[in-house]
Image (cartoon, grey):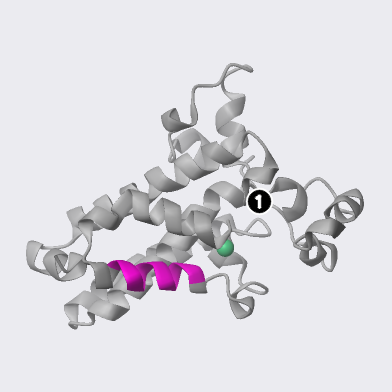
Amino acid sequence: MIAQYHIQMTTEAVAQNFSERAMKAIISANLKQDALKNQFGHDEIHYDNNAIEEGNRYISEQRGYVIAALLSQGNLSAWTAFGRLLHTAQDFYSHTNYVTMWLDQFDGAPPSPAEIDPLKKELTESPNLHSGKIYLPMDALFFIKPLRPLTLKLLPKDSHGWMNLDTPDQGPKFPYAIAAGTKRTVHEFDLLRKLLPPELFARFTDK
Ligand SMILES: [Zn+2]
């Protein structure tokens, strides 16, 4: 997803739980994941190229860093690890076919985006779950809007260009990706709330 939607999902889901400085650090770390150096060769950060297991592992690693950082009084490191984790968790819905599989359950009459379950086990563990492959150079040229129609002609249907739900331009599935990413963000926060002893949790939220 592009920056404005990562900001929107994160703010909507967890801003009320954190201090302003914590929120700033979380969002800034989230957005840094899309810096050029983190774009290519880091499929796990964005669930690109079918890196489903790697993406899942990356999220648990970052969760571990949050806890380790808080134990050693490193509040800022905890916030940045949480921001990195959220970026990947949110990209899951815009880069995999999770939303498509969820919608396919309803025979053409799907519930509203607000009803999406972001972690339906049959879908997260389905052998059919996959994500867009990056075909270079076309998938890089896809980001230059005037070249988009041409690149889509050249790109296979399993490419990032065809599969992504990064912006509203991608059609009616986009609001489902946003709703799922927002709910997942709440879920990731709740998970830490349960895992962290009250003292560390207070340090984490900085409120
Ligand atoms: Zn990304």
Quarter location, residue 104: top right
Query: Does residue 24 belong to the magenta stretch?
Result: yes
Inspect the image, locate mark 1, and give the three-letter code of the amino acid beneath it: Ser
Start and end of the magenta stretch?
23-31
Q: Foreground residue, 91 or 72?
A: 91
Seen from the viewer's position, the closer of residues 62 and 165 is: 165
Ligand 1 falls in which quarter?
bottom right
Residue 182: percent from left, percent from top: 41, 46
Decide if residue 102 is in sight here: yes
Crowding at mark 1 (Cα within 10 Å: few <14, some 14-19, many 20+) = many
The image quarter containing residue 64 is bottom left
**Residue nearest the observer in this picture, 140 or 52:** 140
- Horizontally, residue 169 falls left or right of residue 74, namely right
The answer to whether residue 126 is visible is no
Check disc 1 and report the residue beneath it. Answer: 131
Say left or right for 166 vs 155: left
User: Is label 1 within 8 A of ligand 1 (CB to nearest ligand atom)?
Assistant: no
Is residue 45 shown left or right of residue 135?
left
Q: Can you say whether 84 is above or below 1 in the image?
A: below
In the rendering, at what x and y percent does residue 132 appear? 70, 53
Residue 52's place in the image compared with 175, above or below, is: below
